[in-house]
Amino acid sequence: MSSIAVTSSPSTATNTVQRNRALLRGWLYVVLLVLFALVLVGGATRLTDSGLSITEWKPIHGVIPPLNDAEWQEEFAKYQQIPEYSQINKDMDIAAFKKIFWWEWAHRILARSVGAIFALPLLFFWLTGRVERQLKPKLAGILALGAFQGAVGWWMVSSGLVERTDVSQYRLATHLTIAALIFTATMVVARGLLPSQGAAATRFTQRFAGVLVLAVLVQIYLGGLVAGLDAGLSYNTWPLMDGTIVPGDMFVIEPVWRNFFENPKLVQFVHRLGAYTVFALALWHMIAVRRRDPGTLHARRALILFHLVLLQAIVGIVTLLTQVHLHIALTHQALALIVLGYAAAHWRATKGSYPLPAAASAN
């Protein structure tokens, strides 16, 4: 049943729509916060080599961690059956195992939590008529992508349980990129629900802002490959890499295309090039918008976005120079999400807010 009665006046209908949008927006901002925490804990799980500590996928029963010594020994015994333990962590005791277990458990519990935080309020808002028709496919798509992400997460973990001592970098980068896509889509919808804040930007500005979002997503994917290969632990100099601008031995694997995904040197070099590209695009975008839309909110956001990209570049360099220090690396990952979220919100804002339904816009 619609929350807007047929007999409502245009102003009353508009107020009702805006109230509903404020509720949806607040809910989506909570979802974004949990997604942000989820990605950071996932990054810490990777950086502490904790991702293979839970060797089974139990979507329901897995919520409950080991509660006594016998259950801990049982969980540890399962971990002792995989190559990571036998080839790398053979001297690990139960105390050390608990440390890596809790990172992976926290990551999984956050993933389940964000699913509930998204699905249950969505069901309530949908059934009470607070979700506009234009929003339904968008929100349903985010929910479906979240469910798919759960399966991809286990697909990633399973790659490290039989033959490998870590997860596949292909699958890790895919898992991270889907998380970034969910974060982006949620931010775009939330930003579109804000009341109108002036005219839309020029078509050029809209398209350039969209290109920036895509470039940041690609850079996050490249960062996932770097993390999956531990490529940041070597060649820890900047601006030179291996003593030169363009290092050699970047195409030593056959066929050649595999080097872009499996050669740590080339993967790190491409990630560096991606960072330079995002920086150049953000700089160009800032200058272009300030010329085409001077004095507007669009120009101000472009300026802020450039400074966020600049800060991220500095933190990325420090991450490299410190050989991926845990706290600095997590800051780098957090800033990547902040840049992505701000770029996505900026792109949506250049297009304006979602149009009001016909019944509410008749005034």
Image (cartoon, rainbow, N blue to C red):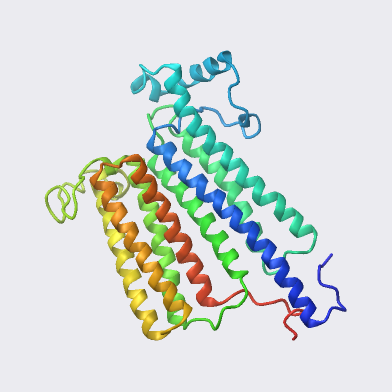
Q: Give the residue displayed 65% in from the left and 29% down from the top.
A: 61
Could you tell me residue 266's position as x and y percent? 24, 49
**In the image, is 260 to the left or to the right of 64?**
left
**Could one spot residue 263 in this view of the protein?**
no
Q: Give the residue displayed 26% in from the left and 40% down from the top.
A: 233
Q: Quadrant of residue 96?
A: top left
- Please identify the quadrant where the N terminus is shown: bottom right
**In the image, is 270 to the left or to the right of 142?**
left
Along the viewing direction, whichever of 296 and 64 lies nearer the viewer:
296
**In the image, is 11 to the left or to the right of 90?**
right
- The answer to whether 13 is drawn above or below residue 333 in the figure is below
Could you tell me residue 265's position as x and y percent? 23, 46
Along the viewing direction, whichever of 150 and 94 lies nearer the viewer:
94
Number of residue marks: 0
Q: Quadrant of residue 190?
A: bottom right
Along the viewing direction, whichever of 245 and 158 lies nearer the viewer:
245
Along the viewing direction, whichever of 16 and 58 lies nearer the viewer:
16
Q: Give the residue displayed 48% in from the left and 35% down from the top.
A: 157
